[in-house]
Amino acid sequence: MYPFIHIGRFQIGTFGILLWLAAVSGCWVLYKNFQRKGVEADAINVTALATVAGIIGAKLWHVFESPHLLMQIPLQLLLDRAGFAWFGGLVAAILVLMWQGRVAKVGALGMLDLAAPAAAVGYGVGRIGCLTSGDGDYGIPTSLPWGVSFPHGLVPTVQRVQPTPIYEFIAALLIAWYLWQRGKTDRPVGLLTGEYLVWSGLARFLVEFVRINPRIYFGMSNAQVASIGSMIAGVVLVVWARRHPHIIIQAQKRKHKPAAHTVTS
């Protein structure tokens, strides 16, 4: 794998390139969702703010997972190109999207529903950046024929290991497709967000069994504990949404229709 592309004296990180591509892909999906729902919001602005918040949240969550190292080498840990925690990025991006939902007048949960397929696509593409850079997000040693090694990665290994970023990429695209199909018809607000939290949490929980992350809590990694929290929150949100089926995203082009309540959550 190639963590950097060298152009003369300059080098460009492949993780950064794929992160940009993830944002572009997510932005396109969000834009198409805005179009089909008649929402007059700027997909580029929404995506940019959520992406920046997600990166910062992912880095901070990773850093605070190792407080002893933070005290010893704070700058090295903060500026390290490797080390981003999925759950931290998810929480930060959700908070920013909820705020932007109120600004766009579709409601906090309404914006999360609209962004759910885009988030899945962006996450999957971003995982390919982890693969190309070899940043330590790979899995345990394996003898499977599709095992890979990262002798030149940011966190190098010459052993053949599980290509977990590829597993997550495939799972993320399947989740995105499912959510996109579900979004073709009006759903109770919060339902798609809840389903996203359940399915993405389950995918991350399962892939952790072949990841190299240390087991800390009852034989589970930090990410697995966070995944359980994600799934629980998702189930609660799905139940809430099903109990309030009259609350849907009221597209701006349909404001003259009295059939649905405007989302203000």
Image: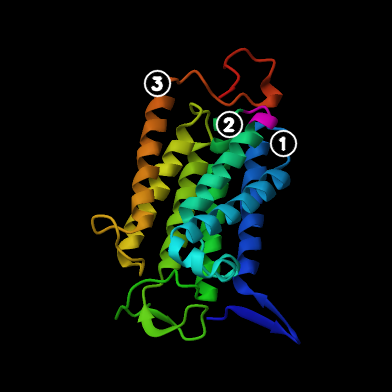
Would residue 85 be seen by someone viewing this image from the given angle? no
Quarter that holds the C terminus: top right
The percent coordinates of residue 200 (x first, y second) are: 42, 49
User: Which residue is at 35% across, 67% downward?
Assistant: 211
Would residue 51 be seen by someone viewing this image from the given angle? yes
The percent coordinates of residue 195 (x first, y second) are: 42, 39
Quickly name the residue at label 1. Answer: 41
Query: Which residue range is magenta in the image?
Result: 102-106
> Does residue 41 appear left or right of residue 139 in this picture?
right
Q: Which of marks 2 and 3 is nearer the N terminus?
A: 2
Tell me the CA gap for discs 1 and 2. Answer: 13 Å
Which label sits in the foreground, 1 or 2? 2
The percent coordinates of residue 63 (x first, y second) are: 50, 61
Taking depth in this image into account, of 106 and 39 the one nearest to the observer is 106
Give the image quarter of residue 221. Answer: bottom left
Quickly name the residue at label 2. Answer: 108
Q: Which amino acid does label 1 sit on?
A: Ala
Quickly name the residue at label 3. Answer: 243
The percent coordinates of residue 10 (x first, y second) are: 74, 81
